Image: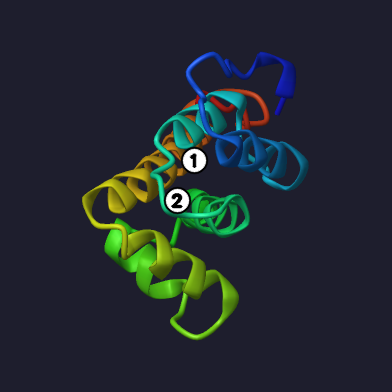
Amino acid sequence: MDAAQLDTADWNRGEQRAAARQLVNRAQMTTKAAQAVVDAMPQGVGATVYSQAVNSLYRMGVTQDVQSFEQAVNLTGSMNSLGGAVRQVLALGDVGENALRIAYTYGKRSIWRATTTTGNGWNRCC
């Protein structure tokens, strides 16, 4: 991911910038996906928790064995730190769920693109 390509113009909270930095440093997410999930970041959640949650759902989306958002959420577990982060974001209501669905959907698009391209197949679209 190229941090220089992130458009920070609409980010008015320090937590959004911090989440973007964490995703740039740790996530294997495309720039477009990172932009979308940070744009959707709800108020009331910290950067570390949010980054863990969206990265987890993105990775679940990339996993071919995961067939639905609901399954992805269940597979994050309930007691470990990833499951806890996911549940904290979900506790924010529709805005939290929407943000996680965006991350999951970008992960699915990534794997869809990988299976429909020629060559090595990993030509990420999103």
**Residue 2 appears at what percent x and percent y?**
73, 22
95, 67: nearer the viewer: 95
Residue 25 is drawn in which quadrant?
Answer: top right
Does 21 appear above or below 72? above
Q: Quadrant of the N terminus?
A: top right
Q: Residues within 10 Å of mark 1 (few under 14, many from 20)?
A: many
At x 44% / y 82%, what residue is drawn? 78
Given the image, on which type of amino acid does mark 1 rest?
Ile
Q: CA distance from mark 2 to mark 1?
A: 8 Å
Q: Residues within 10 Å of mark 2 (few under 14, many from 20)?
A: many
**Which residue lies at the image location 44% right of the left edge and 43% below the top edge?**
103
Tag 2–tag 1 contact (CB < 8 Å): yes
Task: State which tag comes first along the sequence, 2 or 1.
Answer: 2
Q: Is residue 100 visible?
A: yes
Q: Amino acid at mark 2?
A: Gly
Q: Residue furthest right?
A: 25
Left or right: 19 as drawn, with respect to 126: right
Residue at figure coordinates x 36%, y 74% from the top left: 74
Residue where numbered disc 1 is placed: 111
Q: Mark 1 falls on what kind of element?
A: helix
Label annotation for residue 61: 2
Point out residue 119 in the picture as x, y percentages from the top left corner.
65, 24
- Residue 36 lies left or right of residue 74; in this view the side is right
**The quadrant where residue 92 appears:** bottom left
Q: Nearer the viewer, mark 2 or mark 1?
A: 2
| In the image, residue 19 above or below residue 97 | above
Q: Secondary structure at mark 2?
A: helix
